[in-house]
Amino acid sequence: MTEPPSTAAISHEELQLAARNHAMPLEALRWDVTPIGLHYLLTHYDVPMLDPSAFRLEVDGHVERPLSLGIDDLRMRETVTSTVTMECAGNGRAGLAPRPVSQPWLLEAVGTGEWTGTPLRGLLADAGIRDGAVEVVFEGADRGVEGGEAQAYARSLPLADALAPEVLLAWGLNGHVLPPQHGFPLRLLVPGWYGMTSVKWLTRITVTTVPFTGYQNQESYRIRRDEDDPGVPVTRIAPRALMVPPGVPDFMTRRRFLPEGRVTVEGRAWSGRAPVVAVELGVDGEWIPARLERASGPFAWRRWTAEWDAAAGEHELSCRCRDEAGGEQPLEASWNVGGYANNAVQRVAVTVGGPA
Ligand SMILES: Nc1nc2c(c(=O)[nH]1)N[C@H]1C(S)=C(S)[C@@H](COP(=O)(O)O)O[C@H]1N2
Ligand SMILES: [Mo]
């Protein structure tokens, strides 16, 4: 029998966050590119309303030539479209006990977009990075208070990571103008890294000679054993496989019901560290190899399928993947203060031959 991830009741504060920041319903794993509106959302403060005609992106700091660009200036640059899977670092948080109090994600804080924009490194080359630069700081137009500190949402990347060819300044999603909730008119997109890196409503890029000490790098998004542990930064996405729960759900419990017989279980698997090379479907603790399909790009999830001869009775399905770097998914979650990067395997309770 599968236990609920956490038996502790969620608070009003967690409910407020959960209502604003929705997940991707697991059945949307059927789409290679997540339709806009089904992609997950995570916004720390408020969604800002920006006027694209007044919009400027400033590039400053330790550069030869500071730049100030409008959206049309950016659109005239080299333009690329890539299919990228993004996942929130807090995905899986609600599976931890005790549950860290923040956005209470179960497993579905993920989505894949076809992002259109211009490579960041071309822009940085035009600005001319001076000797001695170590990091690049990205600041959004949204403001709030977090940990008692007033701030604009800002995150940094080590210079070498900012210069990776796949890093984009994106203005398009799935062939449309970027929607307000995903960062209109411009966002950073850092393929392979957890979502907090991809700053939305991007208005300023600053090259620095010292590591950034802003809240979202120094205080938040670190794996800490306890409050006194300085911890290590959360960076790239850990491997994870998810399945579309087979059959039909019970309205309240979401327990699955399906008839006896052969069923194709399908899902997606991804890792921001190395390509996914294997997926397995677990049936009551026995692992069956799944068939893997090609990914739409080096940073996109891969579809997988596995056949299961469903016999009448109660079953527990699970799935797990492995990446080329040897990264795997644990059967049991390991706890940390912020509840980050919990990639423990998904478990789905199924009744075969029941009311459905
Ligand atoms: N400016 C800004 N950028 C942001 C955030 C934010 O609150 N403000 N949230 C981050 C987090 S934690 C995640 S997981 C992703 C979510 O992107 P999405 O809402 O487009 O899915 O955006 C990141 N970029
Ligand atoms: Mo996130």
Image (spheres, rainbow, N blue to C red):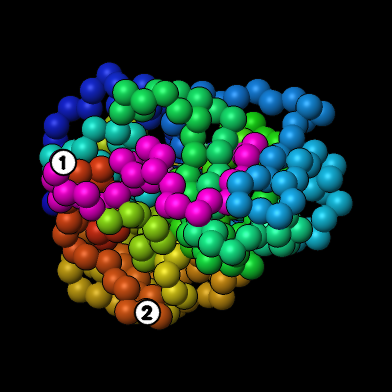
Q: Give the quadrant of ligand 2.
A: top left
Q: Secondary structure at mark 2?
A: loop
Q: Is residue 264 above or below residue 34?
A: below
Q: Give whichever of 325, 282 is nearer the camera.
A: 325
The circle drawn on residue 55 is none
Magenta segment, which residues? 202-231
Q: Give whichever of 301, 100 is nearer the camera.
A: 100
Type of the residue with mark 2 = Ala
Give x and y (percent) for residue 347. Answer: 25, 56
Q: Which of the two marks, 1 or 2, is nearer to us in this view?
A: 1
Give x and y (percent) for residue 7. Answer: 14, 35
Decide whether residue 281 is among the magenta residues. no
> Could you tell whether 128 is left or right of 8 in the image?
right
Give the residue pinned by disc 1: 227
Give the residue pinned by disc 2: 325
Quarter occupied by residue 191: bottom right
Give x and y (percent) for residue 55. Answer: 75, 31
